[in-house]
Amino acid sequence: MRVDIISIFPEYFAPLDVSLLGKARQRGLLDIRVHQLREWTHDVHRTVDDTPYGGGPGMVMKPEPWGEAIDAVVVGAEIPPRLVVPTPSGRPFTQQVAIEYAKEPWLLFAPARYEGIDSRVMAEYGSRLRVDEVGIGDYVLAGGEAAVLVIVEAVARLLPGVLGNAESVADDSFAPGSMAGLLEGPVFTKPPVWRGHEVPPILLSGNHGAIARWRRDEALRRTAANRPELAARLDREALDKRDREVLQDASFRFRPEDMAN
Ligand code: 6GU
């Protein structure tokens, strides 16, 4: 997969040289190119922002540098990239979106600082390529760069050959199928006792059926406690009697009509 990133802080993307993504790049699975937006300015101050029309606080990123930068990156391409514009007002970035992006041959990221990019940039490219405005959560960052790191990491680990263990992807909390819609439960390794804390004995029992059941109980408890809205959306048909008992025990309340069967 090819990834282009246009930013006024190219150095922000140093983490992409490290660990899993660094290795994927070395192995040629990921071709990441970071560009300095200011290269496409023409004034001595290399200005990328200006005051907002209509007034208000902060500054807005000027359209001209973005237009020239995106044109330069995309020029000559037969199949254009998908343009991803991180913004807290975008559609939520989820595992489903990560899976979608992992199928794309080319992503182009346009992270903004200040109050965002002049909206005409998204209008202009909306008619030429697929443009997604995406946010990564309900909080406000100082700029889109950290969001790009998040999105690239979530997408890259899904690419064939990037993860060593193929099961790691299938077991993800938010992967479809796995323990569908459940958060993953706690994990343990050696030693069997650490600072007086024991590993749950069931995990040492060798009883694979009982271990699977215990893990599912823990996943249900954790989901009910930490993400009640996910628990509420669990597919009723996929829950057995024990599942419902565990959820009730976690004082998670189904609607009465769900408790009939
Ligand atoms: Cl994509 N950008 C900024 N600046 N803040 C955010 C965000 C993005 N997603 C959540 N908060």
Image (cartoon, helix red, strand yellow):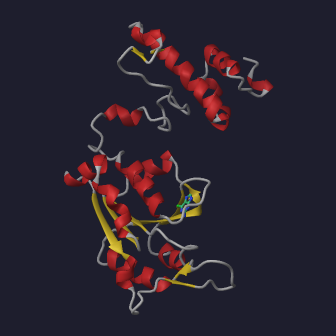
The quarter in which the C terminus is drawn is: top right
Q: Of all residues shown, which one is farthest toward the left? A: 27
Which residue is outermost to the bottom? Answer: 43
Q: Is residue 236 left or right of residue 133?
A: right
- Residue 92: percent from the left, percent from the top? 57, 54
Q: Which residue occupies 61% across, 56% down? A: 139
Point 32% across, 60% down: residue = 14
Q: Find residue 102 and report its horizontal and vertical position in percent.
A: 38, 51
For the image, the number of numbered tags is 0
Q: Residue at x 47, y 37 (%)?
A: 175
Q: Nearer the viewer, residue 55 or 211?
A: 55
Work out whether 229 lies above or below 151: above
Ligand 1 falls in quadrant: bottom right
In this view, 260 is above or below 61: above
**101 sits left or right of 76 in the view:** right
At a point 38% along the width and 37% down the height, the residue shown is 169
Image quadrant where one finds the N terminus: bottom left
**Residue at the extreme front of the image, as rendered:** 195
Residue 83: % across, % down: 44, 67
Examine the rendering and report whether any part of residue 63 can be seen: yes
